[in-house]
Amino acid sequence: MRDYREVNRAYWDERAPAHAASPDFAFDAYATDPARISDIVRFDLPLLGEVSGVDGVHLQCHIGSDTVSLARLGARMTGLDFSPASLVQARQLADLAGVDVPFVDGEVYEAVDLLGADRFDLVYTGIGALCWMPDITRWAEVVATLLRPGGRLFLREAHPIVWALDDARTDGLVVIDRPYFEIDEPTVIDADDGTYVQTEATFSTTLTVEWNHGLGQIITTLLDHGLQLTGMVEHDSLPWDALPGQMRPTGGGEYQLADRPWRLPHSYTLQARKSA
Ligand SMILES: C[S@@+](CC[C@H](N)C(=O)[O-])C[C@H]1O[C@@H](n2cnc3c(N)ncnc32)[C@H](O)[C@@H]1O
């Protein structure tokens, strides 16, 4: 088995140009509309509040649409991702949008070495980020170290129960088939020749190596690393079609189960603050 980072980087590198060209990311709109921000950051706004003037880092920033959106709201953002092809697109988007955002090529577990300790007022991450981390404890240590005293984590992520579901059912059943808790053994998926946005592109990399982390594991390790929980909201939608054939769009780029969506927490927003 190849190193998980090599496998996952190849997967994201191949998809980055298609994502940047997709109408779902709407890069052109950032050039023509100075008020344009991503659907994801727009969804976050009521819980995120004011970010103007803060030093923020977006971990696993992908092609930079949320990073650039936060910069447009006045945050001094840095983006970090280990996919060079994603960062090429992110830098082009920042140019298009006319914002100054450094995008750093690096692995999350090396973020402190690359960016420094006690550097940020805001660590922003999520939306398909935690599933690529084998060890949530090491991730929490990185988040806690990047933050200045009094700084905060803003995490909106798919709910771990969603990552545990079988996403290939054709019988309409919602079935738990993958780990809910973090276990050493990764979930290796070798079937994903598509992606989560509209595109005509076809992909040859189909392999991903992923881990789930239970909600209690995520919260407990953040508390263990000196963060105080300041908010925990579960949502009845998430921003991609996670169960194809079983979900319906609800507007603003969000999707939920078409049948009785109240059965499932789809995503959550967790906020935590480092002690001052
Ligand atoms: C689903 S995308 C994140 C999407 C992002 N939230 C957005 O909406 O644009 C996952 C990103 O995580 C990055 N990634 C995966 N594992 C990583 C790691 N170990 N270190 C740094 N980046 C990583 C990938 O390169 C990819 O850009």
Image: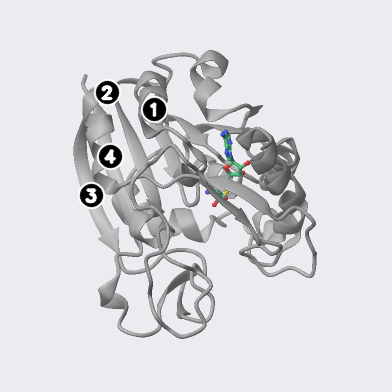
Question: Would you say the residues marked 2 and 1 are in contact, meaning their CB atoms lie under 8 Å apart?
Answer: yes
Q: Amino acid at mark 4?
A: Gln
Q: Secondary structure at mark 1?
A: helix
Which disc, if any, is residue 217?
A: 4
Percent of width and height locating residue 11? 70, 48
Left or right: 166 in relation to 7:
left
Q: Is residue 82 visible?
A: no
Q: CA distance from mark 4 to mark 2?
A: 12 Å
Dot 4 or dot 2, earlier in sequence: 4
Mark 2, ligand 1, within 8 Å: the answer is: no
Which disc, if any, is residue 225?
A: 2
Left or right: 63 in relation to 61:
right
Q: Quadrant of residue 142?
A: top left
What is the image's colouring?
Answer: one colour
Q: Amino acid at mark 3?
A: Met
Q: Secondary structure at mark 3?
A: strand
Q: For mark 1, what is the residue?
A: 143
Percent of width and height locating residue 111? 52, 22
Left or right: 27 in relation to 145:
right
Foreground disc of the pair 4, 1: 4
Q: Is residue 10 visible?
A: yes
The residue carrying pointer 4 sits among few (fewer than 14), some (14 to 19) or many (20 or more) residues within 10 Å by Cα, namely few
